[in-house]
Amino acid sequence: MSALMRSVVLFARLFLALGLLVDAHGAVDLPLSKVFKGESQFNRLVRIAEQDGWRSLPLGERTVAVGQALLGTPYAGFTLEIDNHTESPSVNLNGVDCWTFFEIALGFARMLEVKTGNYTPQDLLAMIELDRYRGGQCDGRYTSRLHYLEDWMYDNERRGLVQNLTRSLGGVPMRGRYLNEMSKYWRTSRYLRSNPELVPEMRQIENRIASRTIYHIPKSQVPGIESKIRDGDVICITGRGPEGFTEHVGLAYRDRQGVVHFMHASKDERRVIIDVALSRYLYRYRKFAGIMVVRPREASQSAMAALVVSSR
């Protein structure tokens, strides 16, 4: 088969994979009005993306462009808790927390690469499912969601969606850590309150994550590696522990002077902001210990990987 034919087949399979994701994700079990909030915001982003040619930008710059368009979006917690029993990919553009901010920005940026136009909320939901769920698929159960950033990094890197640069940038192992937040405080979750039989499974997931060797870059070392951070890198801020590994997450944004800032949904400011220089931000709170640096990749490779995994 010629290189041209292989490319044609690859892209045909990619769009088939996207179609399968849109048709098969858990959102089909719940009405669109329940799983997608802020359609006017979505349409606004699409208009800006098409006017400003975001699709031609590299993924990192494209993600930052989406993030900048979301500046000022109100901070809102628990936006994924949308049902008592059925887990489904969802998007709320009317309010975001630190995690949903970066994943919406990234998902929208990937959507622009996968399709050439005629974007719909279902397209964004498909990209969110690819990113948010173990193996890239939501099976309707709460435990199929990647609830911890450490698990998100592991699963997405395994599928080719991201590259965790932390160790290569001089990261050191985080020793003596454990995870029990979700199994210990399960009553704070609408899904777990309604399905307490899932708590033991959640505990097993936490133990499995904590058993891996997880690296971070101590905050005193961050100024020395900032030159290697790119626009749109996912910056996971680590804590002092021993309970858990990460405290917060956002996106890297490099200004015109070359300074790396932290773009995030700020709980203190109650909105999405571009904060001070990353190395300064890390010293704002004593509980912050350092960072992990994760570089997203285009969805075309990972969408194919997800299709392969699902067919096994």
Image: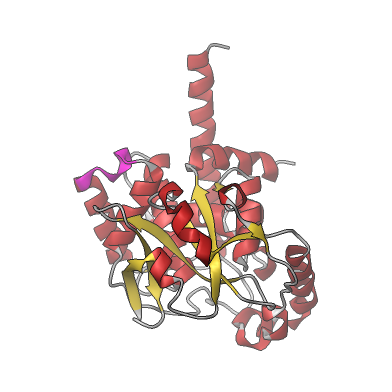
In terms of depth relative to the viewer, which is nearer, 28 or 297? 297
Say above or below: 107 vs 95. above
Q: Which residues are magenta?
A: 52-57
Taking the view exactly as shown, the residue that stands out farthest to the top is 2
Image position, residue 61 (x, y; %): 34, 47
Asked where in the image residue 154 lies, by quadrant, the reply is bottom right
Asked where in the image residue 114 lies, by quadrant, the reply is top left
| Residue drawn 64% across the image and 64% down it | 140
Instruction: State how the image is colored.
Output: secondary structure
Image position, residue 160 (x, y; %): 59, 43
| Residue drawn 34% across the image and 39% down it | 116
Is 173 left, or right, of 266 in this rendering? right
* Quarter of the rendering occupied by the N terminus: top right
In terms of depth relative to the viewer, which is nearer, 13 or 174? 174
Image position, residue 291 (x, y; %): 53, 63
Taking the view exactly as shown, the residue that stands out farthest to the bottom is 187
Whether residue 257 is visible, yes or no, is yes
Taking the view exactly as shown, the residue that stands out farthest to the left is 51
Is 169 left, or right, of 64 in this rendering? right
Whether residue 89 is visible, yes or no, is no
Say above or below: 279 vs 115. below
Number of numbered tags placed on the structure image = 0
Classified by dominant secondary structure, the portion drawn in magenta counts as helix
Does residue 51 belong to the magenta stretch? no
| Residue drawn 46% across the image and 67% down it | 100
* Quarter of the rendering occupied by the C terminus: top right
Image position, residue 87 (x, y; %): 60, 69
